[in-house]
Image (cartoon, rainbow, N blue to C red):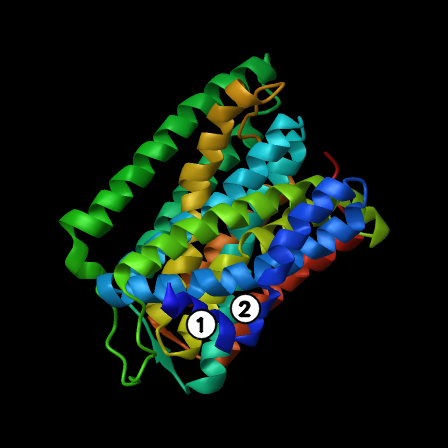
Amino acid sequence: MRRLLHEIRHNPLLWLLVFVPLVFAAAQVWPEAHTLLFVLSVLAIVPLAALLSHATESVAAKTGDSVGGLLNATLGNLTELVIAITALRAGQIMLVKASVAGAIVTNTLFMLGASFLLGGLKHHVQEYNRTSARVQAGMLFLATIALLVPSAVSGADSAAAFNQQLSVGLGVLLITAYALGMLFSLKTHRELFASVEHAESGHEAPWPLGLALATLAGVTVLVALVSEVFVESVQQAAETFGMTPAFVGFIVVSLVGAAAEMATAFAAARKDRLDMSVGIALGSASQIALFVAPVLMLLSYVVGPAPMDLQFWPGAVVMILIATLTATLVTNSGRSAWFVGVLVLMVYLIFAMTLYLLPPRV
């Protein structure tokens, strides 16, 4: 605990933790002040993300970057899961689908591209394990096919009932594929996913494993609670700031939900630990596509007013497909430089600008 308090005292970014109790207090006192709650929740998530970053790096120092990246992706995706479940309970199925599709695209393009850019600005050329990246990209491509099929056959007779049955079957297949992928990468072929050795050394002393794990668990819960306040206020706040519903779900919710993972991925890239950055970005995207999306679909039968299917609007499926192909292309060599990050970020900015100016019809 002393290590944690010392870190908070000496890191000005963590002083923003004061906004965590403030956002909960404001939610109780001024529940209708949506714009205020939106700003406070974003400010509260930032320091929590920084804490999560430090704790995850400490765990990765004990377990290796590949496992550390997987752990961070898993805990980070709890935020997206809570945001989506909150929206499901409110019957905002379209917001759920937009946030899921946006999370996949944001992690694949924005997080990966920014990691390449930030790491490349400090290091001339960076290397990482391309086998791990290709496996994650392959899993993401499988999920893209599963999301493409319901949209492709949506014009069939009795489409509603058919899509529900098809979505359940696809969800089971995706969860099975994800479980087998974890078995492959963490058990049967673990040696293929070892981190690339880097010349840079002298990392900060990691926290004790017990403190790191406790911090990971506690901070993840706080991020999830703050995210509930965020999702309840984001729609009204979006109108105040002139943002469209499509832009909110696809871009804003995704960026805030992935804040914790981004903090870790960017810090790792700057320290020339690109294996961890790539593992978090692609691992999180494939985890959302193969696990979070089908789990949300199955949960909708329990917590939602109406069941959700896996039929996304065509524009979202196209963006996911392009993001997957982009990630596959840029990670094929196992090397990166800052300009590669610029190219990937440009693809993401094209999507963001399109959604801001011309939201898809749903």
Q: Looking at the image, which residue is at 41% across and 85% down?
A: 123
The circle drawn on residue 151 is: none
Q: Quadrant of residue 96?
A: top right
The circle drawn on residue 7 is: 1
Q: Quadrant of the C terminus?
A: top right
Q: Looking at the image, which residue is at 38% across and 68% down?
A: 2
**SS label for mark 2:** helix
Question: What is the three-letter code of the residue carrying label 1?
Answer: Glu
Q: Earlier in the sequence, mark 1 or mark 2?
A: 1
Question: What is the three-letter code of the residue carrying label 2?
Answer: Leu
- Out of 10 and 193, give the one closest to the viewer: 10
- Out of 7 and 262, give the one closest to the viewer: 7
How far across and how far down the image is residue 69, in percent? Answer: 35, 59
How far across and how far down the image is residue 140, in percent? Answer: 41, 47
How far across and how far down the image is residue 196, in percent? Answer: 25, 72
Which residue is disc 2 drawn over? Answer: 14
- Out of 106 and 215, give the one closest to the viewer: 215
Q: Quadrant of the N terminus?
A: bottom left
How far across and how far down the image is residue 299, in percent? Answer: 49, 25
Q: CA distance from mark 1 to mark 2?
A: 8 Å
Is residue 132 among the parts visible in the rendering? no
Q: Say few, some or many: other residues with alpha carbon within 10 Å of mark 1 (under 14 / 14 to 19 / 20 or more).
A: some
**Left or right of 261 in this view: 252:** right
Cβ atoms under marks 1 and 2 closer than 8 Å:
yes
> In the rendered image of this protein, does residue 58 appear above or below residue 81?
below
